[in-house]
Image (cartoon, grey):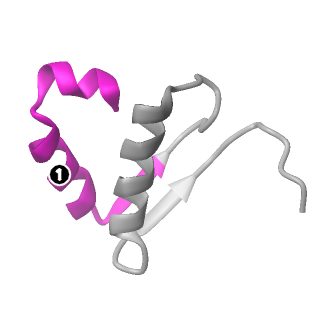
Amino acid sequence: MEEGLAIVPLGRLHRRLRRAHLLIVDELGRVPFDRTGGELLFNLLAGRHERRSTLITTNLAFPW
């Protein structure tokens, strides 16, 4: 997402991702990101919560 900052203004990219009917976040955690990247992702997912569908995939172990 941070790479998108250099190409598309953040506000426009954020609105576009928020409006998508289905957002797929593939391989979350494969490439680490800094605090700013984590905050951007959190804000995006929080804004979509209970409004739009979001699918997250990862190969990282998740303790159930």
Question: Residue drawn at (37%, 61%), measured in percent from left and top?
Answer: 22
Percent coordinates x, y for residue 62 in the rendering:
83, 50
Q: Which quarter of the image is occupied by the N terminus? A: top left
Going by the image, does 35 lie left or right of 59? left
Q: Amino acid at mark 1?
A: Arg
Percent coordinates x, y for residue 30 in the rendering:
64, 26
Q: Residues within 10 Å of mark 1 (few under 14, many from 20)?
A: few
Q: SS class of the residue under badge 1?
A: helix
Residue lying furthest front: 35
Residue interval drawn in magenta: 1-24
Q: How many marks?
A: 1
Going by the image, does 17 lie left or right of 16? right
**Does 62 appear above or below 33?**
below
**Does 6 appear above or below 35?**
above
Question: Residue drawn at (24%, 27%), measured in percent from left and top?
Answer: 4
Question: Residue drawn at (41%, 65%), measured in percent from left and top?
Answer: 46
> Which residue corresponds to mark 1?
16
Q: Is residue 20 found inside the magenta-colored segment of the image?
A: yes
Going by the image, does 6 lie left or right of 58? left
Residue lying furthest bottom: 50
